[in-house]
Amino acid sequence: GPKVLQIPSHQIIDMGQMVTLNCDPVSNHLYFYWYKQILGQQMEFLVNFYNGKVMEKSKLFKDQFSVERPDGSYFTLKIQPTALEDSAVYFCASSLGLGGEQYFGPGTRLTVL
Amino acid sequence: GDQVEQSPSALSLHEGTGSALRCNFTTTMRAVQWFRKNSRGSLINLFYLASGTKENGRLKSAFDSKERYSTLHIRDAQLEDSGTYFCAAEYGSSGNKLIFGIGTLLSVKP
């Protein structure tokens, strides 16, 4: 099936540093998403993105978070500065249309020390 | 808030038998997706339903938005079916977001 790639698979950083998580969505997809999963908890929606803009974000999407997809390259999630509670696995997803099957990447495990 | 209640949380089956997983929704959802998490932690798409039923091999899923539930039936379970299964309901005003269930850990034994 369609593949979503995420780079890196693991990232360890010190609290206060900036981190950028990269997602390579399915090539013809137009809608992009980030989800967060803290160990032992349900995966939770962070944000969705279309045509260069955030469409909807959850309360988990703090002011320190930002997303972009410059020039159709990677869809990125930037956290600046990071906090201990940002430690989680972050999953990227993409879909062709608004309302429709989402395809997920394998996740990036972020550890903030 | 909007929630997806998935049950059971764990299920043990003998090879060749079957069972059903269920997700109840506390509000009307537009569609549902079912996933299986593989050994690498990746989510494998099983079904996407906006209504009715779909079948794929030994798996069958149903979604009733009015009655606010979805089911995933597994028949003739095989060892390789073991893993964690998730339902996720599609919900959102300005865009679609998925609300995930807690997952069902399925163990298939010889």
Image (spheres, coloured by chain):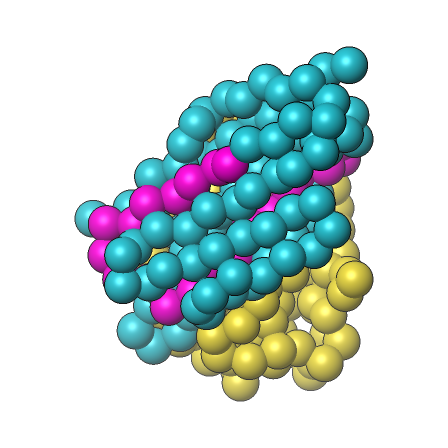
Chain colours: A yellow, B cyan
Side of B100 relative to B106 (left or right): left
Q: Residue at x 59, y 51 (%)?
A: B60
Side of B99 relative to A27 (left or right): left
Asked if A62 appears above or below B75 in the picture, the reply is below
Asked if A20 appears above or below A97 in the picture, the reply is above
What percent of the width, then of the height, locates residue B15?
Answer: 73, 22
Residue B18 or A111: which is nearer the viewer?
B18
In reply to whether residue B69 is colored magenta, the answer given is no
Residue A24 or B67: which is nearer the viewer?
B67
Q: Residue at x 70, y 55 (%)?
A: B56
Q: Residue at x 44, y 68 (%)?
A: B51
Q: Quadrant of residue B24?
A: top left
Q: Residue at x 54, y 53 (%)?
A: B61
Residue B71 or A44: which is nearer the viewer?
B71
Specify start and end residues of the magenta stretch as a single range. Answer: B20-41
What percent of the width, then of the height, locates residue A60?
Answer: 35, 49
Residue A37 in view (yes/no) = no
What percent of the width, then of the height, locates residue A32?
Answer: 56, 69
In reply to whether residue B32 is colored magenta, the answer given is yes
